[in-house]
Image: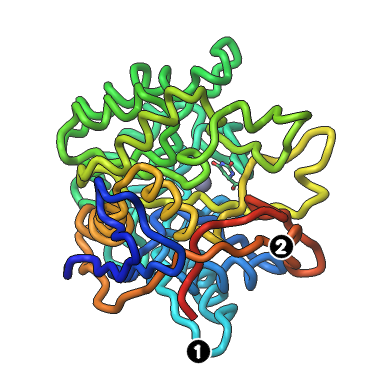
Amino acid sequence: METPSFEAPGGVGRGAHGPGQGARLTLTRPDDWHVHLRDGAMLAQAVADTARRFARAIVMPNLDPPIGKVHEALAYRARILAALPAGARLEPLMTLYLTETTTSSEVARAQASGIVHALKYYPAGATTNTAHAVRDLRRCYPVLAAMERHDLPLLLHGEVTDPSVDVFDREAVFLERHLSPLMRAFPGLRMVLEHITTRAAVEFVNASPDTLAATITAHHLLLDRNALFDGGLRPHHYCRPLLKRADHRAALVAAATGGSPKFFLGTDSAPHPRHAKESSCGCAGIYTAHAALELYAEVFEKAHALDRLEGFASGNGPDFYRLPRNQDRITLVKEPWRVPSTIPAGGDVLVPLRAGEVVGWRLAR
Ligand code: DOR
Ligand code: ZN
């Protein structure tokens, strides 16, 4: 990877005063290691926004019905490619939805397919479209053994769903209750703890062997749980795992900007139509694909670590997945722009993060 190039009135590296307006930051084109592109009406918008910034994306399989088999992943991949705007490129890296009936032969087929790059564990009932997901992880152990043999990574929605556990503690409890035993049982299985939200998760990943990595979203780096109740109930800040206290957010920023290869970019951008969010029982998910890299740039700028954005966004993910780093580059400009208050998506609209407000970086045209 070439070093990121800065053309900056004021300089954009660590310890600098920070880049002035109009500063340009050029880096290796990043990948999104966790995104929800959906299907049908929503697909085109999510694909277009993702392809504008990212070369590849790990595509989550929680459709209704879920993508559980290789032939379903192949068909979904074709729909994603068909939804790309003319001239746009995106390589969808497909995943399968793990269930208690997933077979070891499906794992072998997934590995041989060349298009499936991981299986995704959701605890049943944790979030959007998880009714078919896993109730007892131990029932999946034979399949996890097959994944370990075939060297296919396991992606973890790391929360327990035990109703007796406080909803803000569900990630921390998952670490002790499920992840520690999992790591002991399958020392060779590569795992990604997705969308981490707590200091406990950061410490767990840092203390674990290199088989364990983690993705961090832009929204968990930018917001703490106060944002859920800022002047009233804010459904567009509701996601799973939930936003946490400010000290956890600080631990996530330190992990993302600290230069460790174990942490990389995964937006968890998750579009829902506005009416499904603004509801008496609203869906979890925050849409960030319209400004994903720009929002991460804000975080790294504030931490005086723009020189580390490239490793987090473009280097650590491909290294973990054992894929080549991208060759082409992308340029961000420090120039504020206003996010629209809604984005049309199919026949509906969605409300993106920062709706009606300003983002400090934009993509160079
Ligand atoms: O907030 C979330 N939304 N978290 C998830 O894990 C799933 C996602 C979705 O698919 O809407
Ligand atoms: Zn997700």
Viewer-nearest residue: 324 or 361: 361
Residue at 21%, 45% (x, y): give it: 259
What's the image's color scheme? Answer: rainbow
Residue 273 x %, y %: 75, 54
Residue at 41%, 61% (x, y): give it: 20
Q: Which residue lies furthest to the bottom in this view?
A: 87
Viewer-nearest residue: 125 or 6: 6
Residue type at the position of mark 1: Gly
Q: How many marks?
A: 2
Name the residue beneath numbered marker 2.
340
Viewer-nearest residue: 234 or 141: 234
Q: Quadrant of the N terminus?
A: bottom left
Residue at 64%, 69% (x, y): give it: 45
Residue 253 lies, with reference to residue 68, above or below; the image says: above
Residue 245 x %, y %: 51, 22
Residue 357 x %, y %: 67, 53
Residue type at the position of mark 2: Pro
The local crowd at label 1, few if under 14, some if 14 to 19, many if 20 or more residues have their Cα within 10 Å, is few
Q: How far apart are marks 2 and 1 (CA)?
A: 24 Å
